[in-house]
């Protein structure tokens, strides 16, 4: 393997230590710990693992974890009522509604109902819009984690040809906005892209976020490129693999994230960082100020 492994686990531990320090500062100044509400509706097995991790990591960082587990039969109106109660709860600084939501619930309406100042996922159109206008506030966790990981390893993004594979609202699109903010030259690939291979081959930095195991063959990777693999796919044998063919990509890349141990831990660390940011933002404002 020629590539440097981007150790998301180690960098996430560093971020979590910083978060714990800031959470303690907040508690000393305001007489309460920052509060993060994590809402799960139903019992999707992958979601349950993520939610458990998020709650445990919150507590370890000195963040109050407020758990709401709702049955799969919960209606959209009931979810909206809970979100509204959390918006008005002074102990709650961050609200995360785990996706996917059950069929029949309009996830956009639920996400739009979260107070943008408590939107620790960074999914609210206000936060997306602020990022698009290069004045980021609460930033989507996985893309923010890619940027932080690149910074930690001294990967200079200015002027870099960056290709994002996948254009979802959760990762691909905000990733493109983050890379643009960092002054990379950004290409976004999606199902309408004509020459995916050509776009990846040109890239000095690749972010893969499609959710398909081995979707990006290693031979497409430009020698020396930085490869960030957001995919977390479970194989039939029960192993976790990314969206990039790891061995063949690692033989060509300059840097590469492992799966697991890459962006998974970084995403949780940036969520905790957002929760403490949200607590400080809110404390600095009059109640109800937008
Ligand atoms: N489901 C998969 N990833 C995420 C995420 O980052 N946030 C939320 N809320 N749900 C998810």
Image: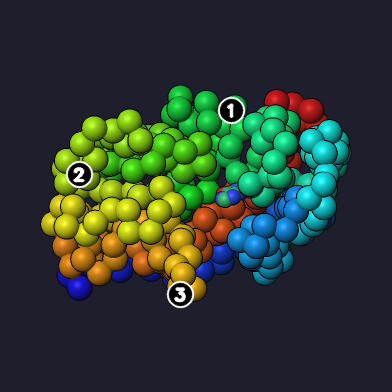
Circle number at residue 237: 3
Q: Which sits earlier in the primary sequence, circle 3 or circle 2?
A: 2
How far apart are the two marked residues, 3 and 2, measured between alpha carbons? Answer: 28 Å
Residue that numbered label 1 is attached to? 125
Q: Which sits earlier in the primary sequence, circle 2 or circle 1?
A: 1
Tell me how the rendering is colored. Answer: rainbow
> Is residue 281 something that shows in the picture?
no
Q: From the viewer's side, name the closer residue of 152 and 220.
A: 220
3 or 2: mark nearer the eye: 3
Q: Is 70 left, or right, of 147 in this rendering? A: right
> Is residue 263 something that shows in the picture?
yes
Q: What kind of element bears circle 3?
A: loop
Other-residue count near label 1 (Cα within 10 Å), few / some / many at <14 / 14–19 / ≥20: few
Q: Position of residue 191 (x, y in %)?
A: 35, 35
The answer to whether the residues at label 2 and label 1 have Cβ atoms under 8 Å apart is no
Q: Position of residue 186 (x, y in %)?
A: 28, 35
Quadrant assignment, res 17: bottom right
Quarter of the image for the N terminus: give it: bottom left
Q: Residue at x 61, y 55 (%)?
A: 272
Q: Is residue 179 above or below residue 43?
A: above
Q: Is 4 left, or right, of 136 in this rendering? A: left
Q: What kind of element bears circle 1?
A: helix
Q: From the viewer's side, name the closer residue of 283 and 86.
A: 86
Residue that numbered label 2 is attached to? 197
2 or 1: mark nearer the eye: 2
């Amino acid at each position: 393997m020629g590539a440097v492994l981007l150790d998301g686990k180690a960098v996430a531990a560093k971020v979590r230590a910083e978060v714990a320090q800031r959470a303690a500062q907040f508690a000393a100044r305001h007489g309460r710990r920052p509060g993060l509400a994590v809402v799960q509706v139903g019992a999707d097995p992958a979601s349950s693992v993520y939610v458990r991790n998020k709650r445990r990591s919150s507590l370890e960082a000195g963040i109050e974890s407020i758990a709401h587990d709702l049955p799969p039969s919960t209606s959209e109106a009931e979810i909206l009522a809970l979100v509204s109660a959390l918006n008005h709860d002074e102990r709650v600084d961050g609200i995360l509604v785990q996706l996917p939501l059950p069929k029949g619930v309009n996830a956009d309406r639920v996400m739009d109902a979260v107070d943008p100042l408590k939107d620790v996922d960074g999914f609210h159109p206000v936060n997306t819009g602020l990022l698009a206008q290069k004045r980021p506030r609460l930033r989507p966790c996985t893309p923010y984690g890619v940027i932080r990981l690149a910074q930690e390893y001294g990967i200079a993004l200015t002027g870099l040809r960056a290709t994002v594979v996948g254009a979802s609202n959760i990762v691909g699109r905000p990733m493109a906005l983050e890379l643009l903010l960092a002054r990379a030259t950004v290409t976004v690939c999606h199902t309408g892209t004509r020459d995916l291979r050509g776009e990846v081959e040109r890239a000095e930095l690749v972010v893969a976020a499609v959710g398909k195991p081995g979707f990006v063959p290693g031979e497409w990777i430009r020698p020396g490129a930085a490869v960030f693999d957001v995919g977390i796919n479970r194989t039939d044998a029960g192993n976790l693999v990314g969206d990039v063919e790891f061995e063949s990509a690692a033989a060509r890349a300059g840097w590469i994230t492992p799966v697991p141990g890459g962006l998974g831990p970084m995403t949780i660390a940036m969520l905790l960082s957002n929760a403490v940011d949200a607590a400080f933002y809110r404390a600095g404002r009059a109640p109800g100020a937008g």
